[in-house]
Image (cartoon, grey):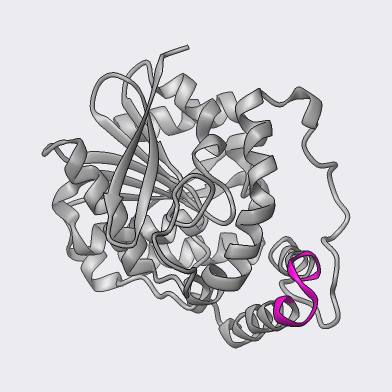
Amino acid sequence: MSATNVENLEVPGATLHYEVSGQGPVLLMICGGPTDAAIYGGLAEVLAEEYTVVRYDPRGNSRSALTGAPEEQQIAVHSDDAHRLLKALGDEPAYVFASSGGALVGLDLVAKHPGQVHTLVAHEPPAMELLEDSARWRAHFEDVHATYRAAGVGPAMGKFIAGVESEDGPQPGAQEPPQGAPGPDMGAMPPELMEMFGRMAANAEYFVGNVMLPFSRFVPDAEALKAASTRIVCAAGEASQGTPIHQATLLLAESTGADVVDFPGDHQGFLSHGVPFAETLRKTLAV
């Protein structure tokens, strides 16, 4: 495995924790939700053979501490963090892989700084405002936030997951995630990932309290993305077909003229199908 260097970057309002491994052109990985740099450890191990892989904790998550009190987060601030990090890494256009809410950040980065990004692979960006039933999703996220204020992070996250993991979207009165495949085998996880899951409890409260609502209302700038010189690929999970997030991914591709590539697994395919997912990403970046 390639050696990993841990660094910090001061940005307005926060200190970003980031990790660098491998050699070659820069491949920046942007994560979403309550996760952090460790979520991409498996991908980094494979792709560091060809790229300088850079992973970071988004501001407010895990080791990327805010310099002030938590406040409502905006995509524009997070994309500016990514812009500043790429600027600190060099002048050559970088490759970017981003998933879930991180993919929304990646799209805003390209819209505002297209010259910094050679290729963006946006894995299932939850651009729910593009859906015909966007009002239902807006109400769902507002309900999750109200549940957090009234009952705490546990019930709120249960309601959040129940909505986003259902093939039919949020259901009235849903409190728990739908029953399906068993969760990850914690005993089989590498130590880095185990440590991340230990950090996610604090991240989850920050996510539902400060990140979820503004991120869920974000609408990518389709005109800017169409005009950008960056190659944009919308990565759609093969096991996600028919789900609202999959539909949003396809609508985004249609509105921006981006390519669509099927990736193994579902919204967490980079964890459940690590090696084939990494190989698909490698082939996609090489085009």
**Image point 66% across, 23% down: which residue?**
190
Give left or right: position of 176 versus 217: right
Q: Which residues are magenta?
A: 148-156
Q: Position of residue 163 (x, y in %)?
A: 73, 69
**Image point 19% across, 41% down: which residue?**
88
Is residue 44 at least partly visible in the picture? yes
* Observer-nearest of 132 and 94: 94
Label count reads 0
**Image point 47% across, 75% down: which residue?**
72
**Image point 28% across, 49% down: which residue?**
10
Predominant SS along the magenta part: helix
Image vertical order of residue 9 relative to residue 240, above or below = above
Give left or right: position of 186 versus 217: right
Q: Position of residue 268 (x, y in %)?
A: 63, 44
Image vertical order of residue 281 relative to residue 191, above or below = below
* Observer-nearest of 111 and 130: 111
* Observer-nearest of 113 and 134: 113
* Observer-nearest of 254 and 281: 281
Q: Position of residue 247 (x, y in %)?
A: 56, 65
Give left or right: position of 147 versus 270: right
Is residue 264 at least partly visible in the picture? no
Residue 182: quarter of image: top right
The residue positioned farthest toward the front in the image shown? 68
Which image quarter is the C terminus in?
top left
